Image: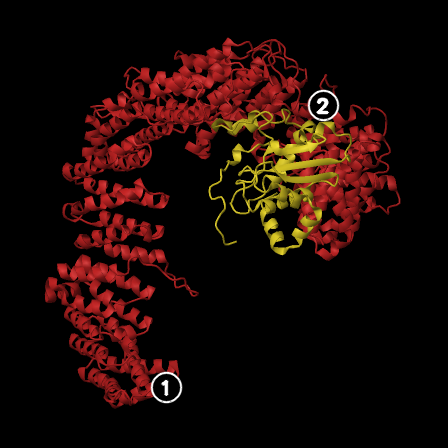
Amino acid sequence: MAHFRQWALEYVLSDDENAQLAITQKAAREIESSRGSSTVVGNWAASVQQWMTAANANDDDQMDDGDEAGSGDIIARAKGTLEALDKNLLRSDQVLRLVGFFGAMFSYDHKAGITASAKALRWLYAMKGFKPDMGVKIMEDVCKIKEDFRLQTAATRLEVYELFLGLIQDPAVSSELKHKYGPSCGFVVDLLQVCQSERDPRNLMVWFKILALLLTDYEPSAEVTEEIFKVFSAYFPISLRSSATPIGITAEDLKEAVRSCFAAHQRAASHAFPFLIQKLDKGDAVTVAVKVDILKTIKACIEQYGNPHASIVPHIEKIWNSLKYEVRNGEVKETIDATLEVLRAIARKLDGTKTHKFDVSLLSGYVDLVSRDCRDDLANPTYTKQAGLLLMTVITANIRAYVLYSASFIDAIRQNLRQPKSPSHSRDLLLLLNSLLKPRMELFRDRKGGHPDDEDRLRTESHAHLDTLFHDVYLPIWTAKSNEPATEEKEILKQAIQGLALLVSQQVLQPDGAAVLLCPSSVSSEICSLLTVTLTKGLTLSSNDNHADSTALEDEAVLALRTIVMNYQEGYGELMSRAVAEIRKRDWASPSEYSLGALKDLLSRLTFIGCSEIPSSITSNTSSQKQSSPLQHFITLTARLLEIFPLSTQSTSPPPTGSTLGSSANAHIISSLHASVLWFREACEVKYGREALASHAGGDTNWLEEFQQLPEDWLLRIQGGNAPSDGVLATLKESDPEVYHQFLKVSLFIVRHLYRLAPSGSRTPWDERALVQLSRMAALVVRSLDEKLQVSCNLAAEAFTYFNSDRFPVQRSVRDLLTGLLTLGILQGLRPGALAGLYKPGAEAEKYMCDTTSFGHSALQESDVRAAIAAILANKYQGGPSTSDPESLVMKRVLDFWGNWIKEATTSSSVDTESFPYYNKIAVNVIAGAAARQEKHVLGLIPVLHQAAASQHPNGERVAESIGAIVKQNDLLTPDNHAVVKRFYKQWVYGHLTRPLLQEAQPAAKDTHTATRYRVAILSVVSNCPFTVYQDDQEPLIRLLVTALKNRAGLSEDVAWSQVVSALEILAEILTNEPDALKGYLREIIGGATEVYQECVQKKGTVAVVQPATRTLCRKLALQVLGAIPTRFEERHVLAYAPPTQRMLAVACGDPARKVREVARRARRAWAKVV
Amino acid sequence: MERDLENANPTILSVSQLPSRSRKGTAVRHGPDAKCDSIVYPKHSWPYGSSSSSDEEDDDGEEPMDEQDIYDLISTISDPEHPHTLGQLSVVRLPDIHLSPSPAELTGPDSLVTVLVELTPTINHCSLATVIGLAVRCRLEQTLPPNYRVDVRMKVGSHAQDDQVNKQLGDKERVAAALENDTLQRMVDKMLETCV
C-alpha cells in the first residue's frame, strides 16, 4: 500500500514522461508479482482513489488547477499501469472493481481524467476476465456524465465514442444489453442524450456508425427508433466547413455516413421516406448538391431495406409523385440522373433478387403508376423526352418489367409517331424507341446471371411488337424523308438509322434456348439495301446533283451498317455486291475528280464496315445457314476488290505528285486493300492482343507452297462458298486467336496475287501511287509474320522474284521503279534472321548495294527506292560481334566500294554533276543503314568523307551537304520494321564524323575553303541530331551558326541556303534547350536572322534561283528564332534590339505566305512585351 | 463588372458554323472510316527520300492577305459580356470586311491597303459597342503590317448611335486617349486574350 501511495505521489509530482512511464511499469510489475492478489489491486486502486477523493472533496470554488491536474495525472497513471499489465492477469471480480473505479470517474464533476478513464475502460474491456454484464455497467456509468460530455475536448469524446462502439459491436455485450433493457432500449435514450449535439467530423463518423448499429442490431421499439432517427436526421443534409488543417475526412465521407444511418434498417422507413421527400419538396430552396444527396439517400434506403412490402411499397406513390417533377420539369442533368437512378432502384427492388422473385403485383403496380402519369405526356412535344425517359428507366430496369410492358410502351410510341406534332417530336419519339431497344440487348446479354425465371420469360416472350417495327415505323419514316431531307429531318433520319441497326442486332430466344436474330433475313436484307443506297448515292449522282454539304447521314449509316453486318453477316456480301455493281456501271478510263472522290469514299467506308471489327457468331433465324467465319467479311471485301481490279486498263496520265485526287481508280482499290489489312489487323490486336502471334505454334509451314496449289481466284471461291480447301477457315471460331494467323495468311495470299499481277502483262493499270500502296501493304503483312514463317516461306528470295519464281525461273535483271518498289515492300518487313541468305558473297545484297547501273526515265524516284533498299540491306543482317563474320565482310566490301566511288567522283570527272546526287544518295543511305547498327567498318570510310567534303571538285559540296542524311530520321530504319538501330548511334556518328571537323571549320581557320565545306557538313549532321548529342560542343558550334547566317561565300546558292535552314533549325533547338549559351551572341543572331528574312522576302537578286519553298522555310525559321528570343532572355539583354526588330516584324506581318504571317504575328507579340 | 447583361440571350453560332478557309477548298472528310486515311491516302504520294522532305508544301504557297485573314484575326476576340467570341455572336461577319484595293489588284508588297471592318452589335443600343470597336482596332493595328490602314465602324442602322460611335473610333487621338485609361486597357487586353 505504502509503495503505491509513494509512487502515486512521485507520479503526480514528476514532469518527466519517461519517469512517469517507469512508475506505471513498476506498479504493473508489483501487481503482476503478487499474481493479481485482490489486496494488491485494492491497494493500488486506493492509492489512486485518494487523489480522486482529495480532488473531489474540495468545493468547486476551492479547487485549483493543480488539484485537477493531479487527479487527471493519476488517472493517466492508473491507465498506464493497466496498459502495462498482462491481459490475462486480472480476475473478473478485480476487473469489476476496476470498472467500478474508472466508471465512477464519469460521475465526478470535473473534466480531467475522462480521456484516461475511457482508455482504461477500453483496456479493461479487452481483459480476459471481462464479463458482458460489466459492459452494461460501463454503459450506464459513462452515460452519467450527461451534459458534461459536451464540455470535453473532441479527442476525449472520440475516446468515449470508440468505447461505446466497441461495446455495442460486441455480440456478448449487445445480447446482455438486449436482455436487460428489451425493446425499450433504455440505455439508448441515455446515450442519445449524452451524445446528441456532436459536431466534430471525426467523432461524427463514429457516432453515425453507433447509431446505424443501434437501428440494425438492437430492435428498438418504435418510440426509440423515432428518437434515434431524430438524432441523425437532424444532421441531414450534412456539410463540412473547409478548414485550414485537413483532418482526412471529406464532406462526402460524412454524407455517406449519414446515408448509411438512413439506410440502416427498414425500421426507419416510415420516418425516412417522408422526411426525405419533405426536404426534396422544398423546391428552389434546395441546391443541386443537396438534391442529389437526398436522391442518393432515397436510393440507398430503397436498396438496403428488407421486406419491401412493408417498408417501400407504402411510400412508392409519394416518392413517385415527388420525383417525377424532377425529371419532367428538371433542367439539371445531375438531379435528373440521380432521380432516374432512384426510380430504377425501386423497379429492381420490387422485382426481387437473383434467388427470390417477389409477386409480380408489386412490380406491375409500380410500373402502372408510372405509365399512368407518363403515357399522355408522350403526345406533348414539350414533355415527350422526359416522359419517355421515365417510362424507359422503369421498364428497362429488369427483364420482367421489360417483357411485361415494352409492348404497350412501344405501341404508345408508334401511335404518337403516326401523328407527330413537329419534326423534333418525331425525333424524340424515335430516340425513345431506340433507347428502348438498346437496353434490351443488354438485358438479353446478362440474362444468364439472373433468376432462372428471367430466361423463361424471354423464351416465351411475344415479339410481335418488335417484328412489326420495321414496316410500321422505320420504313415509312425512311421513305418519306430520305429524299433531300431538310436539316431537321436529317436528325430524324439519323435516329431512324440508329434504330435500324439496333433492330437488326436484336436477338430472341427460341423455345430450345438458342439465341437467334429477331429479324428474318428478308427484313435484315431490306434494311441493308436501304442503307447501302445512302452510301452509293455519291457515286450514282453526278457532281451537279449532289448538294450534300455534310456527310453526317452517311457517317451514321456507315456505323449502323457496321453493327448490322456484325450480326446479320450475309448483309455484307449483299452490300458488296450492290456496291460493286454500282462501281462497274461507271467508266473508269478517264473519271472526273468528283467520281474518283466518290469512289474513294465508298471504298473507304466499305472497308471500315467490313474490317474494323471481327464479326460475332450469332445465327440468324433461318436454320439452313452455314457456319459463318470471323474472316468472312475480310475475305468478301478483298475478293470482290481483287475481282474488279483493274478498273481501267488504259494508261492514265502520270498524276501530279502531292495531290490525292491525281491518283487513279486502280490506286484507290489497292489503297482500300491496304486499309482493309490495317483495319483487320488492328481489330485482331484489340481482340487477341499482340502476343497472340508469338504464342502460335507450327510457324514453319510454307504458305507459299500451299498457295501454289490454290487457284488464282481462291478468295472469290471461298467467298462464293465453293473453295477447294477452306477447311481451317470454315471451322474458325471468333474467340480463337488462330483468326489472326489465318488473317495474315489470307493477306499474304493477296499480296502474292497482286505482286504476280504487277510485273506481268501490261503495266498500265499500275500507276506510281498504286505501286507505293502495294509496297507498303506488303511491308505491313510481311512485318507481322514471325521470323520462322518469313524463313520457311523464303520471303527474302521472293523480294527479288516477286512471287513469280514458278513462272520466271530466271530472275529479272531489269531494275526499274516497279520492281524496286516491289522489292522494297518485302525487304522492309523482313526480320534480320530471314535475310541471311542474301549476304553470301556475290549474292543479291552485295549486288544491290553496289549497283551503279544507270536509271530509267524517273531517276529521282528510282534513286530514292534504290537508296531505301540499300539502307535496309546495309542494316538488317545478323552479324556477330566480330568484324570478320561473312556479313560484316560483305559490308566492308560494299563500304569500300562506295568509298572508292566517292573518292573518284570528287577528284576526277568520271561521274557527271547531274547524276552524282542520285548515286550519292545511295552511298549515303548505305552508310546510314550501317551506321544505325554501328557497323565498325563505317569508321574506315570517315576520312574519305572528310576529304570528299573538302575537295575542290563541285561534287564535294554535294557530299558535304548530303552527309547529314546518315543520321536523318528514316522511316524504314525503325524497330517496327525490325531494323537494327543502336540507341546511341547518333552520338557515335557525331563523335567520329563531325567533332573532328569542328576546329578546322571555325571562321578564323587558315583554309577558308575547307572551313566553309566543313561548316556545311557539320551543320548538315547537327541539324539532324537531338540537342543532347551536340550539347557539349555548343561554343564552337554557335560560332559556326552565326557565320552560316551571314556568310554564304564560296557555296552555290542552294547549298548556301540549305545551310541557312540547318543553322536556323539548330538555333531554335538551342534556344529551347539552353538559351544561356547564346547570350553573348544575341546581336549577331538577331541581325543574322533579320538579314536572312529580308533577303528571302525579295524576289530579285541571287536568291531568286533558290526554290521558293526553301525561301519560305528560311523566312519562317528566321521569324521563329526571332520570336523565341524575348521569351528566353531577360528584358535587359534584348531591350537594345527591340525598336528595329519590332519594325521589321511589323513589316513581316504582311509576308506573302500565310504560314509565315502567323509566325510573324506571334514573334511581334513576343517583342511587343519588350519595352 | 457588376451589372446586368444588356442582351441576355444573343444568338450564338457554333464554331463549325463560322466561315473558315478549310471549308472553301476541297473538304477533308472526318467520318468514322477516316482513321487509316493518312496511311492509305497520304498527303504526299511519294513517301521515300527527297521529294517529300517538306511536310507543309501545301501551305507554303504565296497568298496575299484577304478578307478571311482579317476575319480570322478578329473573330476570336472575346465579347466583353458573354463567354463567346465576336465571330460566334456575329458581331464580326465575313461579308462586312472590305479590303481596298482588293488582294487581286495589289500592285506591290508595300502598296497602301485600307481595311474597313463594319461591326454589328447584338442589340442596337449596346453600350459596349465602342469597347468592341476599340478592341478590333487594337487587334488589327497589332497584327497588320504598317502599310495597312484600319477603319472600324458600326454597320449602318445596326446601332442607335452609330454616328457617335464611328466618330469615336475614327478619331486617332481619342483612341489613343482611351487606351491610356487603365480600366479600358485592361478590358481590351482581356478581350484579346483569346486571340492566338
In the image, A955 versus A659, the foreground residue is: A659
Position of the C terminus of chain A, as image quadrant, is bottom right
In the image, A720 versus A114, the foreground residue is: A114
Vertical placement of B31 versus A1024: above or below? above
In the image, A370 versus A842, the foreground residue is: A370
Answer few, some or many: residues within 10 Å of disc 1's Cα (few below 14, many 20 plus, some between 14 and 19): some
Chain A in the picture: what colour?
Answer: red
Answer few, some or many: residues within 10 Å of disc 2's Cα (few below 14, many 20 plus, some between 14 and 19): some
With A1149 as the anchor, is A534 left or right in this view? left
Disc 2 target residue: A860
* Residue A794 x/y as whole percent: 55, 22
Q: Which chain's residue wears label 2?
A: A
Amino acid at the residue labelled 2? Leu
> How far apart, in angstroms, are the residues tagged by discs 1 and 2?
97 Å
* Residue A637 x/y as whole percent: 46, 18
Dot 1 and dot 2 within a common chain: yes
Picture quadrant of residue A828 = top right
- Residue in the image at 82% along x and 25% along y: A913
Query: In this rendering, does residue A981 appear at all?
Result: no
- Residue in the image at 74% along x and 25% along y: A918
- Residue in the image at 15% along x and 36% along y: A360
Query: In this rendering, does residue A294 appear at all?
Result: yes
Disc 1 target residue: A14
Q: Which chain is yellow?
A: B
